Amino acid sequence: MSRRCLLALAVLLAACNANGPPLVVEDVVVTRPVPGSAMSAAYFRLHNPGREPVVVTGVRSPDFMRVEMHETTVEDGISRMRPLEALRLEPGETVEFRRGGRHLMLAGPAADAGPVTLEFLAGDSLLLSVSVARREGS
């Protein structure tokens, strides 16, 4: 299998209600760290299919020492990356995590082989867990 090919291995929904899963994640890409770096990034689309707002207060991964939600903005022609403490998704809303915008910073990988699991949280509650193959960083 090519490393450049993204392979979704499993999507596990941690919490469901009568309205369905609290979040849906699509097109997840987790990059491999560039040589000499312990940093990776994750990009994806996050959708709230429910009838109530959902607030993501954090993301964690057993495959990294630290995971942070960030947003890159341009101010006075200078690109700045700032942490996002929380992300609110209104009913029906989809938010993109992409290069040059919102993204996850993944620090201190436990290993470079195998899938990466990302767990989306609301406080101490697990909303969604997704596992994906890594791809070459760029």
Image: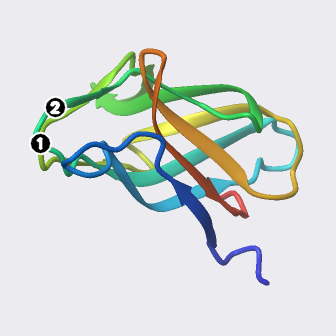
**Quadrant of the image for the N terminus?**
bottom right
Q: In this view, does 24 lie to the left or right of 135?
A: left
Disc 1 residue type (three-letter): Pro
**Quadrant of the image for the C terminus?**
bottom right
Where on the picture, by quarter, is residue 64? top right
Instruction: Give the crowd class for mark 2: few <14, some 14-19, many >=20 residues within 10 Å.
Output: some
Residue in the image at 48% along x and 41% along y: 14
Which residue position holds label 2?
53
Residue nearer the viewer, 99 or 106: 106
Residue in the image at 34% along x and 44% along y: 16
Q: Give the distance between the C-alpha atoms of the residues marked 2 and 1, in whole angstroms.
A: 5 Å
The extreme front residue here reads: 18
Q: In this view, does 107 lie to the left or right of 16?
A: right
Residue in the image at 86% along x and 49% along y: 35
User: At which x and y percent is residue 5?
Assistant: 66, 78
Which residue position holds label 1?
91
Q: In this view, does 10 lie to the left or right of 35?
A: left
Q: In this view, does 66 lie above or below 51?
A: above
Circles 2 and 1, Cβ within 8 Å, touching? The answer is: yes
Q: Which mark is residue 117?
A: none
Q: Which colour scheme is used?
A: rainbow
The number of callouts visible is 2
User: At which x and y percent is residue 67?
Assistant: 61, 28
| Mark 2 vs 1, N-terminal side | 2
